[in-house]
Image (spheres, rainbow, N blue to C red):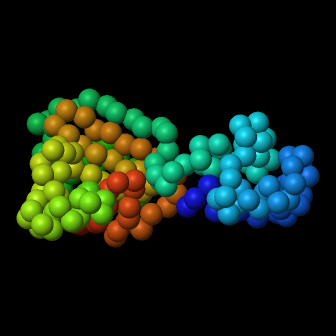
């Protein structure tokens, strides 16, 4: 969602008209309409006041499409201390399951880079799939979508770390996009 779409949604959720919000911010209704159609941005003071009035964070309003929150946790692990068993097809699965024992669901994911138009052309001309393959070799993590207590987390496991970020909005476990990455579910562990 764009800034304007988020502003409009937050304003409606707060039960305010454009005129009411404009009056509270001491700006014209046209200014609010301009912001909601992404033809302008409020100044910092209006942005801070607006976030408070609409009960949303500034980060939420300014988020560039990423669904991740700013809270990322990273903890060291010894991957060799985990054994695959049951629905766990790998040590990474077992590490994620051990960390999220109380999860409602854990989906093992495959990550693909979302190619720019230029990368797509280059990929097609050079060798279809070569950019995706190179990107997969450069990323050592195995990814999971964890659902726990009504929240979703994007978790990753490397040989040395388990990291996770709470998602700012709900995604469909089968297929979703976060920033420059596309994720799709391979199988469900839990």
Residue at 59% from the left image edge and 43% from the top image edge:
59
Instruction: Answer left or right for 35 relative to 18.
Output: left
Q: Residue furthest left?
A: 127
Quarter of the image holding residue 15? bottom right
Number of numbered markers: 0
> Which image quadrant: the C terminus?
bottom left
- Residue 91 image offset from top left, x and y in percent: 14, 46
Rendered view: 50 above or below 7? above
Residue 189 can be seen, yes or no: no
Q: Residue furthest top?
A: 76
Quarter of the image holding residue 146? bottom left
- Residue 23 image offset from top left, x and y in percent: 91, 52
Residue at 39% from the left image edge and 56% from the top image edge:
178
Residue toward you, 37 or 114: 37
Residue 138 can be seen, yes or no: yes
Rendered view: 101 above or below 128? above
Rendered view: 9 above or below 98? below
- Residue 84 image offset from top left, x and y in percent: 13, 51
Residue toward you, 89 or 62: 62
Residue at 21% from the left image edge and 65% from the top image edge:
121
> Which image quadrant: the N terminus?
bottom right
Residue at 64% from the left image edge and 62% from the top image edge:
5
- Residue 80 image offset from top left, x and y in percent: 11, 36
Instruction: Answer left or right for 154 relative to 170.
Output: left
């Amino acid at each position: 969602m764009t800034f304007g779409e988020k502003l409009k949604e937050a304003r409606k959720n707060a039960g305010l008209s454009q005129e009411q919000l404009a009056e509270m911010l001491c700006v014209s209704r046209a200014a609010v309409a301009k912001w909601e159609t992404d033809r302008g941005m409020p100044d910092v003071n209006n942005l801070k006041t607006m976030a408070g009035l609409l009960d949303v964070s500034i980060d939420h309003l300014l988020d560039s499409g990423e669904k991740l929150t700013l809270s990322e946790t990273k903890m060291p692990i010894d991957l060799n201390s985990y054994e695959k068993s049951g629905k766990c097809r790998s040590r990474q699965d077992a590490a994620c399951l051990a960390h999220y024992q109380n999860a409602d669901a854990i989906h093992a994911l495959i990550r693909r880079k979302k190619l720019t138009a230029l990368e797509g052309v280059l990929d097609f001309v050079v060798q279809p799939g070569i950019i995706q393959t190179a990107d997969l070799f450069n990323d050592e993590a195995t990814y999971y979508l964890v659902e726990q207590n009504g929240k979703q987390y994007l978790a990753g496991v490397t040989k040395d770390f388990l990291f996770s970020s709470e998602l700012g909005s709900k995604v469909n476990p089968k297929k979703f996009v976060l920033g420059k990455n596309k994720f799709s579910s391979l199988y469900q562990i839990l």
